[in-house]
Amino acid sequence: MESPKDLTSEFFNNTAQTYDKIINLTTFGKDKYWKKEIIKKISECNSILDLGCGTGILTFQIAKKFPDAKIIGVDTSESYLNIARKKVKLDHKISFLLQDAEKLNLASKFDCITSSYIPKYCTPDILVKVCLSHLNERGKIILHDFTYPQNKIVRTFWNFYFVILRIAGKLIPNWKKVFEDLPKMIRSTTWLDDYKDIMKTNNFEVKVQFLTLSSSAILTGTKKV
């Protein structure tokens, strides 16, 4: 059986060119709202690390709010990073690096570390440990990902929607694997509780915000003094 992380290369192979449009379309534009909610949780800071930055959707929104901050986005996909690099403007203080979030080795620390959509793929204790080694004192970790709705009525519509996406995947071959396997992963993942427990163990003050009928969530951990 493939591990969640093993699926990333299959999910995101040959999808970079269409990612921005697909993520906006399949979330009915909610991805933009979710990203704005993530941004709201970033305190005034001088340095931000965006893990699993992909094409830089969140990274550039962060740069817009914090134009003077040093911002680094990392991802394991060169094709996604190439899309992100093409968006960089002269006034941006953004760097994009090819690195694995779980094996991150940067010679700097950050005031805030963000990540959207990769928590479910990673091993919680490994990712939190890596974040801690790159986090300044009183720093903040903000993680966002999909969650399986608890309300039975919402679940019915959620499940039906992914049936439709599975059919759509036949028309969009590069996304077929994602539309087939992503709902299974979302149903089975316990990323939110796992990261929350590990953060508490590592002396973080933890807060959770559920979004859009609990179809996604933001987990914020602030390092206690």
Image (cartoon, grey):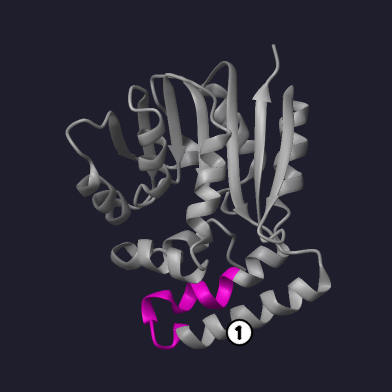
The residue at 59%/42% (across/down) is 143
Q: Residue at x 80, y 64 (%)?
A: 150
Classify residue 86 as left or right of residue 49.
left
Q: Is residue 13 visible?
A: no
Q: Nearer the viewer, residue 103 or 96?
A: 96
Query: Going 61% across and 30% down the picture, which residue do you hit?
Result: 129
**Spot occupied by residue 115 in the image (x, y as percentages of width and height):** 52, 42
Please tell me how crowded label 1 is: few (under 14), some (14-19), or many (20+) other residues with Cα within 10 Å: some
| Residue at the image point whose x is 54% and y is 22% from the top | 133
Looking at the image, residue 75 sits to the left or right of residue 207; the answer is: left
Question: Magenta segment range?
Answer: 169-182
Whether 186 is drawn above or below 126: the answer is below
Count the marks. 1
Q: Say if 14 sits above or below 207 in the image.
A: below
Q: Quadrant of the C terminus?
A: top right
The stretch drawn in magenta includes residue 181: yes
Magenta stretch secondary structure, dominant = helix
For the N terminus, the quadrant is bottom right
Identify residue for label 1.
163
In the rendered structure, does residue 59 fall within the stretch colored magenta?
A: no
Instruction: Find the residue positioned furthest to the left.
Output: 90
86 or 101, nearer to the observer: 86
| SS state under label 1 | helix
| Residue 155 position in % (x across, y down) | 75, 73
Q: Nearer the viewer, residue 132 or 66?
A: 66
Tell me where residue 26 appears, x and y as whole percent. 49, 71
The amino acid type of the residue labelled 1 equals Val
Quick check: can you spot residue 18? yes
User: Where in the figure is residue 24, as x and y percent of width and height?
Assistant: 44, 64
Left or right relative to 66: residue 223: right
